[in-house]
Image: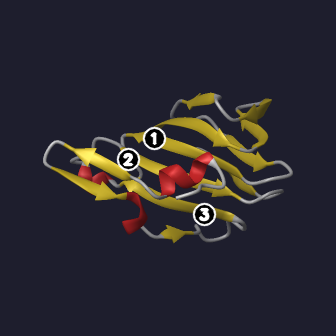
Amino acid sequence: MIYKDIAEIFEDNSVIFPDRARKSNESPWYSPPGWKGVFLKDIIPETETKSMFSYHLVRIQEQCEVPEHNHATQWELNLIISGDGHFLLGSRDHLVKAGQTFVTPPGISHLVRAGDRDLVLLALFVPPLA
């Protein structure tokens, strides 16, 4: 198979557990209400980790954004796998590009905005998003 970008590798692969493998493409894409141009795929939902963490693929279409928000109890780790844009973390605006990782502690406001092409990231939440 020929991939257009590295994000497709994550979309069309497997999660390997000690007792089984689960295809990533078995999880549907969905868009949170009010988040225009933002799509999520639950790669490892909380039900697979006994509510310890969750792992998501996030695609933000060019010039769209995940609106400013915070998580009361979750640590969030974001690994940028393709694209570029801005990550507003607290009061600081950071340019983002593939290969960068951002750590957001609970209660810290953040916003992610794609640049001139789609921005794709892997998001890990501890404890999980419910």
Say what secondary structure mark 3 lies in.
strand
The residue type indicated by label 3 comes to Phe
Residue linked to disc 2: 54
Say what secondary structure mark 2 lies in.
strand
The residue type indicated by label 2 comes to Ser
Name above or below for residue 76 compared with residue 56. above
Q: Could you tell me if the residues under marks 2 and 1 are in contact, i.e. CB atoms within 8 Å? A: yes
* Residue at screen point 43% across, 58% down: 42
Distance from the alpha carbon under mark 2 to that under mark 3: 16 Å
Q: Could you tell me if the residues under marks 1 and 3 are in contact, i.e. CB atoms within 8 Å? A: no
Name above or below for residue 97 compared with residue 41. above
In the rendered view of the protein, which quadrant contains the C terminus? bottom left
* Residue at screen point 60% across, 29% down: 101
Q: In this view, does 19 lie to the left or right of 101?
A: left
Say what secondary structure mark 1 lies in.
strand
Residue linked to disc 1: 124
Residue 36, how many percent across, how many down? 72, 68
Upstream in the sequence, badge 2 or badge 1? Answer: 2
- Crowd class of label 2 (few under 14; some 14 to 19; many from 20; radius 10 Å): many
In the displayed image of the protein, which residue is found farthest to the right? Answer: 116
